[in-house]
Amino acid sequence: MEFGLSEEQKMVQEMARSFAEKQLKPRAAEIDSTGTYPLPVIKAMAELGMMGMNIPAEYGGSQAGVVSYSLALTEIGKACASTAVTMSVTNMVAEVLNAFGHKEVCSAHLPKICRGEYPAGAFALTEATAGSDPASMKSTARLEGDHYFLNGSKTFITSAEFAGVFVVWVKTDKEAGAKGISAFVVVKGQPGFSIGPHEEKMGQRGSPVNEILLED
């Protein structure tokens, strides 16, 4: 059994290492000290395929595989932990959409994530009273006709102020506990959706976290 890296995996690792050394390492301290979200760097990473590493090519992904993704993320993290957080959460959002989204959802949003048209994706699960216990979340969705109306708030949401698309988790059946949770795709700018100020952090300040508010 062969446990070594394939040539493709080595190429991905070297690409990410070179990018991190040249583009991230020299500015990592400034990103952290100023709390600057490095939009040009994120866009460049998307152009290199690092924002949709396990997404099919039909949606603009690089479909590099989990080993290559891990190698690339490690190299980015060595240079700038904040940027690695952005990369990992955005890839996670893309993978959730790819795994569970309808075809029209994938077609509408995955190419924008992979191309960097969305500067990030956001995963909105945590609430003030529901961190490690998502079943206790208070946010809800009610069905009226053929539309759902979401209400509640989420906190510490990574990249919220820059994300173009959010996977938002809310209760659709308050009596069913953890089994009553559903995921919705929310796009920034939808009526009733707003973002609070970013939280002051002790580190990884180039990866902002915010509260989001859902009002119908």
Image: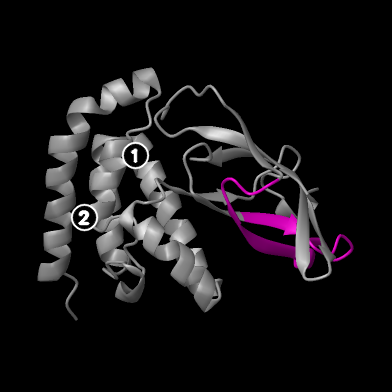
Question: Which percent across, then down, holds residue 160?
Answer: 53, 40
Mark 1 element type: helix
Taking the image as drawn, is residue 173 in sight?
A: yes
Q: Are marks 2 and 1 in contact (CB under 8 Å)?
A: no
| Tag of residue 60 | none
For marks 2 and 1, the one nearer the N-term is: 2
Which amino acid is tagged 2? Answer: Leu
Tell me where residue 40 sits by quadrant: top left
Residue drawn at (30%, 51%) of the image? 73
Tell me where residue 22 sits by quadrant: top left
Residue beneath disc 2: 48
Determine if the magenta segment contains residue 180: yes
Residue drawn at (31%, 43%) of the image? 42
Closer to us: 48 or 7: 48
Question: Which percent across, then down, holds residue 85?
Answer: 40, 43
Mark 2, Cα crowd under 10 Å, few <14 / some 14-19 / many 20+, is: some
Closer to us: 206 or 76: 206
Question: Which percent across, then down, holds residue 111?
Answer: 38, 63
Distance of mark 2 from mark 1, alpha carbons? 15 Å
Mark 1, Cα crowd under 10 Å, few <14 / some 14-19 / many 20+, is: many
Q: Specify whether 131 is left or right of 204.
A: right
Residue beneath disc 1: 83
Residue drawn at (46%, 58%) of the image? 92
Q: How is the image coloured?
A: one colour
Q: Which residues are magenta?
A: 168-191
